[in-house]
Structure formats: C-alpha cells, structure tokens
Amino acid sequence: MAVAEVAAGRAGNQTERGVAMKIEERASVACPYCGELMELRIDCSEGSQEFQEDCPVCCKSVTISVVLAESGISSVEARPEE
Ligand SMILES: [Zn+2]
C-alpha cells in the first residue's frame, strides 16, 4: 500500500479538489485489535483526515487515517491509538 506516496502527492495540490466529489463516503476498515470490519462514514469535504473511532465490537479506540483523492477515498488505514 503506497499510503505515504499518495499523501505526498496531495500535499502540493490542496486547491484543486474535484467538484464532483460526494460529500460523504462510506468505507470499511478492519479493527487493528479484533480484526472486525468497522463501518465508517467519511466527510469528504474535510479532505484527508485523521480521527478516532471506537470499535463497535471490542470498544477500543482506533485511529483512522483517511487519504482522499480527486475522485473520492484513496485509502483508509486503521491503527491502534497511541
Ligand atoms: Zn475491535
């Protein structure tokens, strides 16, 4: 997964966000603790973002990292909260 590469590509291109992008996208990502899929709703108007989400199965706090591209969600990463 080329997460770092995608993020770097976005960095210099913040002003050219696509107008056709949906406001809210759905994505699912596996919980880093229990492996259960977590259903996420991502606000695409926020751009690439990081937020905390509690796993509905094991109730642990997970850090979600979302990278957005012109056409929508490029990648979603979940990792244990530090
Ligand atoms: Zn979990």
Image (spheres, helix red, strand yellow):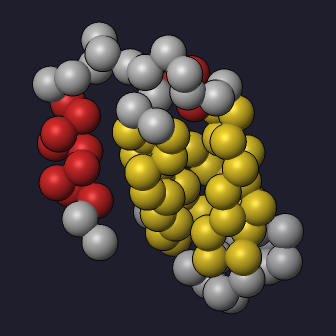
Reply above or below: 34 against 66: below
Q: Residue furthest front?
A: 20
Which of the pair 79/25 is nearer the observer? 25
Q: Is residue 17 left or right of residue 53?
A: left
In the image, is 15 to the left or to the right of 28? left
Total count of labels:
0
Closer to us: 25 or 41: 25
x, y percent for residue 48:
42, 36
Most distant residue in the right direction: 56
Q: Pinpoint residue 75: horizontal percent, then vertical percent.
A: 43, 57
**Residue 54: quadrant of the picture:** bottom right
| Placement of the C terminus among the 4 image quadrants | bottom left
* Whether residue 60 can be seen here: yes
Q: Kindly indicate the quadrant of the structure image that contains residue 3.
A: bottom left
Examine the rendered structure and indicate whether residue 48 appears above or below residue 54: above
Pinpoint residue 36: horizontal percent, then vertical percent.
73, 83
Residue drawn at x 25%, y 45% is 7
The residue at the point 42 percent across, 51 percent down is: 74
Image quarter (top left, top right, bottom left or bottom right) of the N terminus: bottom left
Q: Where in the figure is residue 38, as x and y percent of width and height?
A: 73, 68
